[in-house]
Each structure stands twice: as C-alpha cells, then as structure tokens.
Amino acid sequence: MKFAIALFSPPHSPSSRRALRFSEALLSGGHDIIRIFFYQDGVYNASANIVMSQDECDLTNEWREFIKQHRLDGVVCIAAALRRGILDEQEVQRHNRPTSTPNLSEGWSLSGLGQFHEAAQQADRLICFGGH
Amino acid sequence: MARSMLIITRHSPWSGTSAREALDVVLAGGAFELPLGLLFLDDGVFQLISPQHPSSIQQKDLTANLQALSLFGIDELYASNRSLAERGIAADSLSLPVKIMQDDELTALIKRYDHVITI
C-alpha cells in the first residue's frame, strides 16, 4: 500500500518519535512511503542544528539517516520552515542573511503545501502525526 | 476522481500560527480545485468572530484571509454548535457562511471525507 506521512510536531514530542517508528514499520512490512511532509513545528525535525545529549534519542539524526538510507522523498513546507528559522542555501541567499548558515538537514527539500496535497491525492493512506 | 479532505481547525487566531497554517492548507488545496471542507471546532470557532482587532497585539487580521475561501471555491464550511455555545458566540454573528453542525452531524461529516486532518 502507498502511504503519505505528515508530521506537525517538534522532535522532542512523542508524536515525532511515533511517526518515525510507524514509517520504519511501514517499510519493514513491504509498504511504500511516497512522501514524508513536515509542517508546522514538524519542520524542526529537519533542522541540522538540534543537539541532543549523548544518552538521549537523537530523532533529527534518525530521520536524516532514515530518509537517506531508503532514498525517501522528504519535503519540508517552505513557509512554515522560514518562520521557524529552517533555511537552505537558496533561502539564505534569497533573504540576504549573510551571517546565517543553511541548517536544513541533508536529504530534505523545501517546497510548498501543494506537495502535501499531491501526496494525499496519490497515496492510499495519509497518516498525520502531531496535529492537535 | 480527486480525494476529498476535511481540515479541522481547533485554535483561536491569536494563539500562535495554527489557525493561519490550517487556513494555508485549505487555500493551497483550493488552488488545485480539490474537494475540501473546513471545520471550525473548539477554540477554532474564535476565528469566526467579527470584527477582530489583531493590530492591538501586532498580529494580522485572519478574517481577510478567511474571505479568500470563497474566491478559491471552498464553500464547505462548518462550525460546531457545541463549540460556539460553550464560548457564548452567537451563530448569527459569524464572518463566514458556515453550516452549524450538531454533534451527531459532525460524526457523519467526518465520515464523509477521504482524508481528515486536524491542525
């Protein structure tokens, strides 16, 4: 079955951990993930600047590895990302922030909400995490 | 055939970005002419009060964005009667032509859509 995953909560929330574990279980079970879309505070999961203590679950790193390993389509809503300080190289240039370093994690791309709707149209199931 | 989506918005317009970001999902889907519905639930019904004076807390007026819904052809707009009543909001004072739904009607409404998301 084709799944689309949407995540709306930050990396320290239980929903974000559940979203990742659910996504891992999908692939283990032979399903496809056509897109993972981060929106609202979920965009923080794609930040390269989150630093966890060594003995704590490093979810942003796990997401990055998961996306990379399975070559998934990881999309971060650009409007939600910009207002939360998640920028890629292009946005650093566009908004003229010479002192900023791009902090969008490797493997993710910034794009619009149309990507969310497109995934919802194409998938057999849309599963959202962290909405409230 | 395009899949339908019901977006449930549960936050007041002054409590952060949730109301705005729920509306953005709706308007983005409207741009693709998708069959969408928008349900104002719980504190989300505060978005329907008119007039609002957000400039006094340095915020933008969401009411103007709500008026864009009809331009995008989104006319499946709903509000929970219980949510309105609990907050003392009169159904005839709202800034959008929403259908007022009783609890049992909400159950049927949610069941009718292919996708349901809460923001």
Image: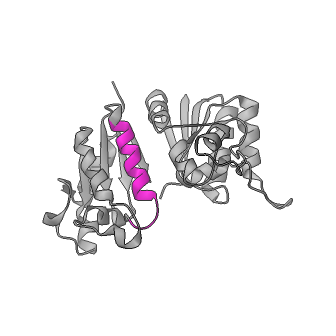
Q: Residue at x 34, y 34 (%)?
A: B31
In the image, residue A84 above or below residue A64: below
* Magenta segment: B14-30
Q: Is residue B24 magenta?
A: yes
Give the side of residue B37 with respect to residue A83, left or right: left
Front-most of B97 and A80? A80
In the image, residue A61 above or below residue A67: below
- Residue B40 image point, x, y percent: 31, 57
Q: Is residue B68 magenta?
A: no
Q: Residue at x 62, y 53 (%)?
A: A85
* The N terminus of chain B, quarter of image: top left
Q: Residue at x 27, y 38 (%)?
A: B72
In the image, residue A100 above or below residue A56: above
Q: Is residue A25 visible?
A: no
How are the residues colored?
one colour
* The C terminus of chain B, quarter of image: bottom left
